[in-house]
Amino acid sequence: MSLLTVQGLSKRFGGLQAVDDVSFSVEPDEIFGIIGPNGAGKSTIFNLVTANLPRDSGQVILDGVDVTKYKTHQIVLRGMGRTFQDAKLFSSSTVVDNILSAGFCRLGKNFTSIILKSYARPSILDREREKAMELLAFVGLRGYEGQLARNLDHGHQGLLQLGIALATQPKVLMLDEPLRGMNPTEKDGVTDLILKIRETGIAVVIIEHDVRSIMKVCDQISVINYGKKIAEGDPREIRDNPAVIEAYLGAEEVA
Amino acid sequence: MVEFLQTILNGISVGSSYALLGLGLTVIYSVYRLLNLAHAEFYMLGGFATFFTVSYLGLPFWLGTIIAMIMTGILGVILELVVYRQFMRRSGFDQLIGTIGLLFLMENVALYFFTSNPRSIVSPVGNSTVRLGGLAISGHRLLIIVVTLVLVLLLYYFNARTKTGKQMRAVAQDRDAAQLMGIDIVRMGQIAFFVSCALAAVAGALMGSLMQVTPAMGFNPLLYAMVVVILGGLGSNFGAIVGGLSIGIIQSMAVTYVSSALSDILVYVLLFIILLLKPTGLFGGKVYA
Amino acid sequence: MLRRAYAAKLGLVLVLFAFLMVMPTFLENQFYIQLFTTSAIMAIAVMGMDVLFGYVGYCSFGQAGFMGIGAYTVAALTTKVGVPFPLALLAAVLLSGFMSYVISFPAFRLSGIYFAIGTLAFGQLVFVIAYNWTDVTGGVYGIVGINNPFGGLTGYYYFAFLMMFAILLLVRRLIKSPVGEAFVAIRENEKLAESTGVATLKAKRFAFVLSGMIMGLAGAMLVCLWSFASSGSFTVSLSLEVLVIAIIGGVGTLIGPAIAAFVLNFVMQYLATIPALRLIIYGILLMLIVMFLPGGLAGTYLRLVEALKARRKEGEKISVSFDSTGSE
């Protein structure tokens, strides 16, 4: 059974059909890529899956549970972590506090139980500090714990975003353009990290523009253009697919 | 039927002053992206300035008002330089808090110097009543409508036909793009402040002669002005006018057909409802909150 | 090391507590006892404001509305129905809490400046209703003759301070807990907080209701001290004043606003011989803080402390590198 199944996702903005009947599924331990020209609707797909945007239609099944009607934070609690294109961080907090804050969801089943637990033992999150430091080391931010999130350079902010998403203990990780604005060295670091993440048993879904890097790590790729899925397959099939080449006509990335 | 039309007419008169206030707020918002809560104080100062020029210097009403407009406008520009520009370094909400501070300051400095004794400005049309068909309206209320109309037309002409007006519209649409086009946005901000404060001053002069001039006179109109700009849409001049007239008419109807107390409640409930259904208002664009 | 700092802080608080408890016996002048008492009640209100604004990041311009609800509830219940004070107080807090729960539904469809204006409308609404609902609230004249259940002023003084410390401890414990972290996460980046599993709507509602209840408590305590309740006391101006004190003290620090309530109340007694001066000073302070000192006084103090700590660390690093022989 697939870990994540997305069926018939659609969204219309005024006169524009931003996402048109998109479906895909992600297996456990799979690295799944979503590529497509600018404005094709890739980020919108993410927003629809995570319920950041209301869907016109579509079904989302995560690890056997139909989360279609769930709110964003409930989907997160079920095991879906995500990052954003514009690096969203708790900018005035330190790096380690960012990770600690993200650990909130593991404390209880719902908010009321968390309130009660918090009151009984206010320092429960502090005990997570060790785990937070381990996580920081895992993503490559060792030594940066005390720094303010907003003072990090772009590459490290991307790593912190990854750390925050990982702190929610996801089963599937949705990364929205994790390589954006990075130099080749940083990009290699992130793709290595993504492979490491897969090794820990977490499936990864990546939206990316840098097609070359995506081809290196993904097992399965879906190509989106004008909100519609125009191709799906492993990197080799995608590279040779005429429809994909045509969609990217003019872009030098597809070598 | 006559009562109904009379109510509408009264509503238009009251609504005109709301529209003026709303326009003042909107002008600054569209150029500066700031809801200037201290606007109430420029309104109040306009009233006082008119009072002093008319009563102490014996100038005719129209001249006193124009002087008040210019003086208040200049004060606005000075404050823009000294205070508001510093506010802009902070986040949007902090800016709002800053304007509250200025509001406190200005209102109470005025209270200190002018005392809370109400002042009266004699209207240039005295106590006359004008008859239109079967309806009656006080001369002064008609004056308010006429002056508002003139100012709205002037503002429209300024925005649509003059070079500066067009530049201001460009800044209102997109600050960065306007800068790249070579428009001096700092100067636009200054002009916006001048215009906004001048409009507030006129409203203060007109309403001050209708009611009375006191240091606290700005607070309640400010609340109404906020309802107006939210209804009309922040950043839309047209919206401010429509909003002002609507609120004026709604309030007038409520006073006539329900009760004066409930009319207040009605306006606030209306604000609440608008915020829930369409916070950007009837004609508002993007939300910069 | 942390133990020592904690013990020191605790010691300081205990000393302060003891001092405040003993003070009335030394103060012969009733005026000062009243001043301290109103400051304590104001501190409660300001802490209520800080929970919502400082920690969650939502600024309400209508909190005086909840104060008014609490005030009128206790006033009407004790004078007209003869309910004993503790019950009336409880009713006041619960009613304010209930009203904030109800208002939270429409209110949290807004955010930022629209939230502020929406809550402003609510606050005004409460004022207008209080002004006109003569049967219950006494209209313009308000309700008079509310009994001070503690006999004299001194009794009320102890009551106010005990409540203040109770609220302080209660709220502080919550703030230092994961729930407080959730609040701050919402303030820092609400979308991100949601994506890390924080039930943002529930958290905000919780904070709003808590804040409303605290404000209701403060309002109720105020009118029992004054022994009358009038609609003119609970206008938007009061909301803004509470907000101003919170900002000057430093939002998001809880203690800062509480201390500011005391300091400002005292300072105003001496400086603001004319009521207008009080608001002038508030206005100037507010503007200065926005322009130059974000984070208010407490925030500035914390930043100084951080800067000094950083300076000391630099100093240690340098001395270490001097001590170490050879290797870098």
Image: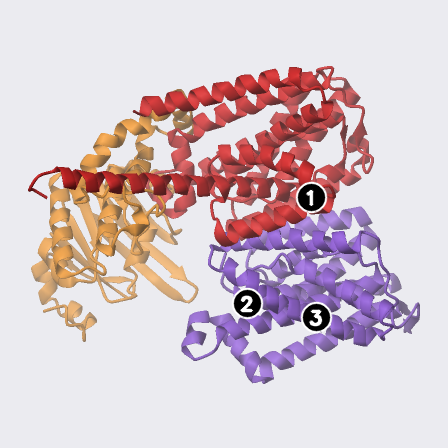
Label 2 resides on the chain identified as B
Dot 2: few (<14), some (14–19), or many (≥20) neighbours within 10 Å? many
Give the side of residue C178 with respect to residue A5, left or right: right
The three-letter code of the residue at mark 1 reads Leu
Dot 1: few (<14), some (14–19), or many (≥20) neighbours within 10 Å? many
Which numbered disc flags the more N-terminal residue, 2 or 3?
Answer: 2
Look at chain A in the picture and name its colour. orange
Q: Quick check: B63 above or below B215? A: below
| Residue C226, image x, y percentages | 74, 27
Q: Distance between the residues labelled 3 and 1?
A: 36 Å
The residue tagged 3 is B71
Give the side of residue A142 with respect to residue C220, left or right: left
The three-letter code of the residue at mark 2 reads Ser
Rendering quarter of residue A134:
top left
| Residue B272, image x, y percentages | 62, 49
Q: Which residue is rendered at x = 27% and y = 47% of the image? A: A82
Is disc 1 placed on a helix, strand or loop?
Answer: helix
Q: Quick check: B156 above or below C191? A: below
Look at chain B in the picture and name its colour. purple
Label 3 resides on the chain identified as B
Q: Which residue is rendered at x = 82% and y = 65% of the image? A: B51
User: Can residue C101 be seen here?
Assistant: no
Is disc 2 placed on a helix, strand or loop?
Answer: helix
The residue tagged 2 is B30
Q: Distance between the residues labelled 2 and 3?
A: 23 Å
- Chain letter for red, please: C
Which mark is drawn over residue C125?
A: 1
| Residue B214, image x, y percentages | 79, 56
Mark 2, mark 3: which one is toward the viewer?
3
| Residue B172, image x, y percentages | 51, 71
Q: Distance between the residues labelled 1 and 2?
A: 29 Å
